[in-house]
Amino acid sequence: MRITCPLCGERDRREFYYKGAALVRPAEEADLAQWDAYVNLRDNPAGPLAELWYHEMGCGSWLTVTRNTSSHEILHVELASGSGLGGTP
């Protein structure tokens, strides 16, 4: 599988660290039920899914990668932002 880093270009997936689904993180003051759902209740869809990947062996950027989980086709790649998506850790 090849991932096209917006800063470095196309690279082998072994240069990246996979963090998981790019989920919207609850607010700090959210109740325990919201945090429980965020931490423990995950969908496992067959099809497009936004994921967080870290370009560990490259520029060190966090990326939001939209990947088809059935075919592993990369549909879209962009730099991850601090918009609450599991973040730019």
Image (cartoon, rainbow, N blue to C red):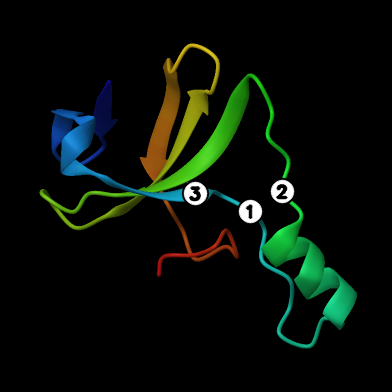
Q: Quadrant of residue 6?
A: top left
Give coordinates of residue 83: x percent, y percent. Answer: 57, 62
Foreground label between 2 and 1? 2
Q: Identify the residue position indicated by label 3 in the image.
A: 20
Q: Could you tell me how far apart the alpha carbons at marks 2 and 1 are, in whole angstroms?
A: 9 Å
Left-right relation of 23 to 80: right
Dividing the image into 4 quarters, which one contains the N terminus? top left
- Quick check: marks 2 and 1 in contact, CB under 8 Å? yes
Residue displayed at 13% across by 38% down: 8
Few, some or many residues within 10 Å of mark 2 (<14, 14–19, 20+): few
Residue displayed at 44% across by 26% down: 76
Q: Which label was assigned to residue 42?
A: 2
Residue displayed at 17% across by 28% down: 12
Residue flagged by tag 2: what amino acid is it? Answer: Arg
Judge whether 41 appears above or below 32 on screen.
Answer: above
Few, some or many residues within 10 Å of mark 1 (<14, 14–19, 20+): some
Left-right relation of 54 to 80: left
Secondary structure beneath dot 3 equals strand
Residue flagged by tag 1: what amino acid is it? Answer: Leu
Secondary structure beneath dot 2 equals loop
Q: Identify the residue position indicated by label 1 in the image.
A: 23
Judge whether 37 appears above or below 59 on screen.
Answer: below
Judge whether 22 appears above or below 32 on screen.
Answer: above
Judge whether 67 appears above or below 57 on screen.
Answer: above
Q: In the current view of this chain or complex, which residue is farthest to the top?
A: 71
- Quick check: marks 3 and 1 in contact, CB under 8 Å? yes
